[in-house]
Amino acid sequence: MRKKLILFFAFLCIIPFISYSQKNIESRNITHGKIFMVDSKIIDCFNIFISKDSVEYYEKDLIIRHVFELNTVDKIQEYRGTWSNTGIWVGSLAGCALGVAVSLGTKETTTTYEGWGYYQETRIQLWPIYLCTALGAVVGYLIGNNAADWGTIYTKDLSILKNLDIQRNRNAGGLCVTFKMSF
């Protein structure tokens, strides 16, 4: 019972940090983003401006400025680029590990006689390390370049859940769960 009481009080101390951790979104200008409407419509738009009670934006191919009330918007996401740099790093590290494993599998030991005794020399080939690292970096870049990074900046949900973002990963067939806290 004592452990449950301590966990309950710890949870009560964390709630204010979670509740107020969302950054102030008023008067914020977003270059590229998506607006998820309450009626399940998704709008790909540019130059989004969020004020106290409204959202203004330009649609992708139109030059007309649209304005919606904030209570008709379910979620707003900001485009933050792709995961290409992360893909390069992860791919090159995985390729390097694979290259080291292949290189250790191709080691050669030669024994020579030098007058006063035998001399053993072990050599490994380094080209598998270089080749696998380069191929891993290229594959990682290609995979990461196809994965867009969207960050949720406004949700209509409860304040505790505003920073919890659950999205379906369409490429891998799973879920991606992120939680952000700003201090």
Image (cartoon, rainbow, N blue to C red):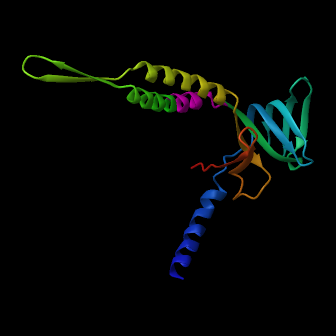
- At a point 21% along the width and 24% down the height, the residue shown is 120
Tell me the quarter of the picture where residue 111 sits.
top left
- Count of numbered labels shown in the rendering: 0
Q: In this view, does 26 lie to the left or right of 72?
A: left
Between residues 168 and 2, which one lies in front from this camera angle?
A: 168
Mainly helix, strand or loop, the magenta region? helix
Q: What stretch is highlighted in magenta?
A: 82-92
Position of the N terminus, as image quadrant, is bottom right
Tell me the quarter of the picture where residue 152 sits.
top right
- At a point 93% along the width and 48% down the height, the residue shown is 39
Between residues 26 and 3, which one lies in front from this camera angle?
A: 3
Whether residue 151 is situated above or below residue 13 in the rendered picture: above
Q: In this view, does 147 lie to the left or right of 122?
A: right
Residue 140 lies, in percent from the top left, at: 59, 28
Residue 41 lies, in percent from the top left, at: 90, 42
Which residue lies most toward the bottom here?
Answer: 1
Between residues 126 and 169, which one lies in front from this camera angle?
A: 126
Q: Is residue 8 left or right of residue 47?
A: left
Residue 164 among those drawn in magenta? no
- At a point 55% along the width and 69% down the height, the residue shown is 10
Residue 25 lies, in percent from the top left, at: 72, 43
- At a point 63% along the width and 57% down the height, the residue shown is 18
Residue 86 among those drawn in magenta? yes
Residue 177 lies, in percent from the top left, at: 67, 50
